[in-house]
Image (tube, helix red, strand yellow):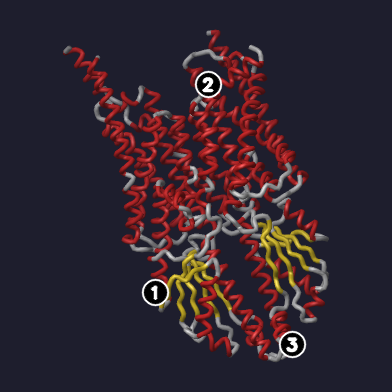
Amino acid sequence: MNIFQLFKAELGAIFTNPALLLTVFGGVFFYSFLYPLPYASQVPREQKVVVVNLDDSQLSRRLVRMVDATPQVKIQGKANSLAQAKEQMITQKLAGILVIPENFYRDLLQGKRPTLSFAGDASYFLVFGTVLEGMSMAGMTLSAEVKITQLLMSGQPMALAKQQYNAVTLGLHALFNETGGYVNYVIPAVFVLILHQTLIMGMGILGGSENEVFREGETRYWQTASPWALLLVRSTIFFIIYTLLSLYYYGPAYVFYDIPRLAALGDLALLNLVFLLSVSFLGICLGTILPRRELATLIVLLTSMPMVFACGFIWPTSAIPMFINTPMQLIPAVPAIKAFILLNQMGACFQQILPQVIHLTILAALYGTTALVLLKWRKCRTEGVQHL
Amino acid sequence: MMAAKTTMIKKIMAKRPSEWRLLVKDPWLLSLVTWLPPLLFFMIYAIFSQGMARNLPVGVVDLDHSKLSRSLIRYYDASPTISITGNYPSTLQGAKAMRGGEIYGLVVISADTQKNATLGRSPKVEAFYNSQFLLIGKQVKSAILQAHATAVAKIDTLKNLSLHTKVLGQAIAEAVPVGTQATPLFNSNNNYAQFLVSAIIPALWQIFIVMATLLSMSAELRRDGLAEWLKDRPVRALIEKMAPYSLIFWLQGIVFWLTMYVVIGWPMHGHLGFLIGCQLITVIACQCAGALIFFLSRDAARGLGIAAAYCAPGLAFMGVTFPATDMTLLARIWRSLMPVSHYIDIQIAQVNYGAAPVLCLPQLRSLLLFIIPGILVCFLAVRISHKYLQTQEAL
């Protein structure tokens, strides 16, 4: 059997396997809509808050209006006591409570430094952070206004007072994902993960189907082909399919979700090459050892969550214990997610992702060799069966 | 005729090995219901076990080299969340380190900062944080903000003390006229482990239950086919198949929750009995959903593929990381199709708020609605069994 016949036979095996086609093509397209779906609105806004105004002065009412005016917070209602506010918060599912203390205005005038209290539901971190941001923004604005008034009262001209209310001001800027959108945060990582997982599933389904056929005692092309040729042909076909699918992800899908694409095409292609190769080889390894085709899906599904949380974009790698972090480095997605984000979202140059590229190359060599050994072993086994 | 009938009855009555025996013989299924769930749950807990991010690397570009700039840097470094790891000679180099992911934040102190501060021109310190890593970026941001506020308040207080005010309290009040105090309710020390792990584990639990349901049913497909399994008692066969797993996963649920709220000691304010009852309903709801996927696909690989699409994004839709109220209608519909998203509402209401069980009735009702896929499964099973009996009759 020459290499062209093998190529044709492989293509036939892939495109007549419904489970494989559903996973690879169906999965990649369906997931590209499903995963961004919950984050379509990007940032949480107008979180509902209840206010307890124990002061009820003109200034405190102004503060309430200022809080309401922030994009993050919406004042849903008023309560007369903290207990009542807490009850309202639980029954109406509100995000937080703003407490303006008694004699707020008087204390402020007398220079006694009254304290505003914000309480937010920290069961939901993103909501808590949003509410806190909105409330402290309003609080800071009020603080600045009061300081300017004090400076004015002490005889400074308005222009100078405006400049001097703070010794050193701070300008805080978000980089790379300026709006703090959730789609831009999650999707670049998840898309790499989807490509990784569906590729392994596809390879696993193909290999698992072969093993099922083998147990039934049939002889097919892959039992006679040389392991070298099989490895080469199979990874080439999947490489071509996944290059096309990656083009869809990093191209139209990113444009659709308005996700930045800072990487140069050449750099992206080079990273994609080592990434897809290492994943393909890992998939072939799994495919040769899994007895049934559905088991690849099972393994992939169960490893997804630990992988997402251990690859460093949600939780800093430095905070993850060594005994989790070290074995995780064997999974191509872990360095790949980091490299793709650095290159495409943060605009790193290729030298800066070189450690990850080398890491992926080593993994490709490791899994490539293992795949070859396993394919040879499987061939020996089938030949042993035939000799009997 | 008579003989044919007796063989048929014999065939129908033939003793089937119990589900427990089948389970022990299938190593994959056995792993899925025994050691894998605790292992994965432990891994997730271990990843977040530190609870809070500490000493996140932040760089600084000090173009002023003054007493003020150095003291500001010391204040930033003193924050437990961040740690000043790099001192870059220019903004360009600092930005490059940011792009390379070496640092999560960069503080730029421009030249003449101290001079301008002394002259009362209120200089500005520019700080950047990486919001591509949103969760980490937010922590860096609030750490810089807090550290800066502390630094400025101290500088202002000292200035006030040295200029005119003689009382410390008054000097502080002049520096910061309105104090603010933020209280995180229900997770009082902003613990990430408590926040994320208590949501990830139910999401994983749902995956395990759905997968085990599909695998246990596809084992029948491999043995003698669905018809031979369901025979003339489809509903009983279904219940006999699912009940052992309901029990195992329910017990697992109880053990994991005891681990989180008793052994680790995270606060739990609600009714334990009610929560455990809801867990059983959640397990059965997940099984019904998994069984429906299986009966619609009737193929192990395709079924598992569909089940993966169904429950893998569970966590994203649960509404813990991103609020459900800010999701689009389509996302909310998909969310409501997963039992675990109703369960997590009950869990948060019970564990965190200590809400009365009555308040959880809407979610409980949604969970009970998963009886619909259960009924559909029974209907499909009965149809298969009818066909089986007809072919038997024809023989």
Instruction: Point out residue A322 in the picture as x, y percentages from the top left corner.
Output: 63, 47
Measure the alpha-carbon separation of dots 2 and 1: 66 Å
The image's mark for residue B162 is 3
* Nearest the eye: B284 or A386: B284
Measure the alpha-carbon separation of dots 3 and 2: 84 Å
- Mark 1 vs mark 3, foreground winner is 1
Which residue bears the numbered disc 1? A84
| Marks 3, 2 in one chain | no
Instruction: Point out residue B86 in the picture as x, y percentages from the top left corner.
Output: 77, 59
Tag 2: amino acid: Glu
Q: Secondary structure at mark 1?
A: helix
Instruction: Point out residue A355 in the picture as x, y percentages from the top left corner.
Output: 74, 43
* Nearest the eye: B124 or B56: B124
Measure the alpha-carbon separation of dots 1 and 3: 45 Å
Chain label for disc 1: A
For the question of whether residue A323 can be seen, the reply is no
Say whether residue A216 is left or right of residue B80: left
* Nearest the eye: A44 or B254: A44
- Residue extending farthest to the left is B2
Contact between labelled residues 2 and 3, with CB atoms less than 8 Å apart: no
Q: Quadrant of residue B163?
A: bottom right
The image's mark for residue A210 is 2
Q: Quadrant of residue B157?
A: bottom right
Q: Earlier in the sequence, mark 2 or mark 1?
A: 1
Q: Secondary structure at mark 3?
A: helix
